Image (cartoon, grey):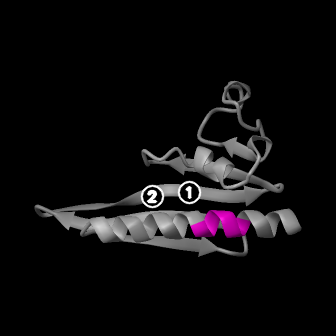
Amino acid sequence: MEKIAQYQQVIKGIMEDYVASMLANLKEEIYLVEDLVNLNYLIYHNHWKDGSRSYGCILHVRIKNEKVYVEYDGTDEAFADVFHEAGVPKADIVLAFHAPEKRPYTGFAVA
């Protein structure tokens, strides 16, 4: 349980910092959504440009089985590496956007 609390703090802190930096540099709505029951953390964007709406997920991370699952990373940041640099061992980070049979080759956890 202590590990989960630590990972929650790491994920929330990093994602809050990312949202703050994005808001400072862009004219979009960008927000962090936290599902504390199921341990999901998402960053979404929403804006209009030239009559077209842009809306979607930028980053989705969840904690499952005491591991950090990066479900989607649509950034240039490589958040798995950012979480690792913040103290989450690679053995506890799953690149869930890769097929299970490809995960052994990522350098991160398989599941």
Q: Give me the disc on residue 57.
A: 2
Q: Give me the disc on residue 60.
A: 1
Q: In which quadrant of the rendered view does residue 44 lie?
A: bottom left
Query: Image height check: is 96 above or below 87?
Result: above
The one of 3 and 111 positioned closer to us in this rendering: 3
- Mark 1 residue type: His
Query: Main SS of the magenta segment?
Result: helix
Q: Residue furthest right?
A: 1
Query: Image height check: is 110 above or below 64?
Result: above
Q: Is residue 72 left or right of residue 62?
A: left
Query: Image height check: is 92 above or below 57?
Result: above
Which x, y percent locates residue 46? 32, 67
- Mark 2 residue type: Cys
Q: Residues within 10 Å of mark 2 (few under 14, many from 20)?
A: some
Q: Which residues are magenta?
A: 8-13
Which x, y percent locates residue 36? 69, 75
**Element under disc 2:** strand
The one of 45 and 108 positioned closer to us in this rendering: 108
Which x, y percent locates residue 89? 77, 46
Question: Which residue is at a point 67% across and 26% down the rendered structure image?
Answer: 102
Residue 24 in view here:
yes
Question: Which residue is at a point 51% across and 48% down the rendered structure image?
Answer: 73
Question: Which residue is at a point 12% across and 64% down the rendered structure image?
Answer: 51
